[in-house]
Image: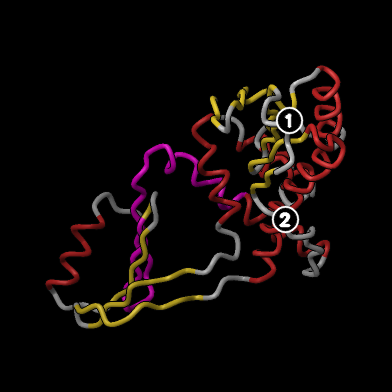
Amino acid sequence: MIVNNIDKLFKNYISLGKSFKIRKSANYTELVTSAGDKIYQNKNDKFKGGLFLFGMVKRDIKDYLYKNGKDIDVYEELPVNYQNENFDKTKKIIGIDIDNAYWSVAKLKKYITLKTYRKGLEKKEYKTIRLSSLSSLGKERVYNVYENGEHTRDESINGDKTLRKIYNDIRYSTYGVMKEVAEELGNDFESWKTDCVFFNDTKENRVIVTEIIEGYGLSCKIEHRKIVENNKVEM
């Protein structure tokens, strides 16, 4: 059940000495009654408008696992950000960003269908929801447990390991594209930050980066331009 003022309900449960558990995130709050009923409030109207994506992603991944099994071959673990310490800081730098990176990689690896992919891109405000629908896969949940209106403990519920492997595979596969670009550019590579790679801005390097990214069926765009002088960065 979805309500508009879960904080009021929470206070009522406390004053009435009820038993329940609750967890909060940036965009929503979930309260679970002693009978197991779940009550939600979405704090972000834009987030609420795209909640259907969670169901679409969940259904797609369920179908994927049914067809392919639960043995997920996760890409090698790579850092979300990586810096080339040998980069010549006097060089002019440009950034090229993979469009809708995690969402696009999820489609590329067939975790989500083309229908879900397109639906998630229909509105700009769906960006947060797209990311949340993927990052929540198999995630551990922590509840504040109340007994007779008193907070007694916190309860952790382990997430689904297979679903977490899928999310990590999406992440590491994205960074894998960044790593491939870095290796091809050599010392002209400056850094990568999640899905954006920074490098010495030359026509040749732009072609190299674009061809690698587009070679996977991904699209990209120039995201940031910066000049590094005396270790100071201008974006």
Q: Quadrant of residue 213?
A: top right
Label 2 crowd (10 A; few <14 / some 14-19 / many >=20): some
Q: Is residue 48 left or right of residue 94?
A: left
Pinpoint residue 102: horizontal percent, then vertical percent: 67, 44
Q: Is residue 156 left or right of residue 34?
A: right
Observer-nearest of 213 and 69:
213
Observer-nearest of 105 and 206:
206
Label 1 crowd (10 A; few <14 / some 14-19 / many >=20): many
Q: Is residue 38 above or below residue 156?
A: above
Q: Is residue 153 left or right of residue 126?
A: left
User: Where the N terminus falls, by quadrant?
Assistant: bottom left
Residue in view at x 43 percent, y 70 percent: 142
Instruction: Determine which residue is flagged by label 1.
Output: 199
Badge 1 or badge 2: first in the primary sequence: 2
Callout 2: helix, strand or loop? loop
Q: How many marks?
A: 2
Mark on residue 78?
Answer: 2
Residue in view at x 17 percent, y 72 percent: 14
- The amino acid marked with disc number 2 is Leu
**Which residue lies most toward the front here?**
230
Asked whether the viewer can see residue 178, the reply is yes
The range drawn in magenta is: 29-56
Pinpoint residue 196: horizontal percent, then vertical percent: 67, 35
Q: Is residue 150 left or right of residue 43?
A: left
Residue 33 is a magenta residue? yes
The Cα–Cα distance between marks 1 and 2, rounded to whole angstroms, is 19 Å
Pinpoint residue 225: horizontal percent, then vertical percent: 62, 22
Q: Between tags 1 and 2, which lies in front?
A: 1
- The amino acid marked with disc number 1 is Phe
Q: Is residue 195 above or below residue 156?
A: above
Asked whether the viewer can see residue 116, the reply is no
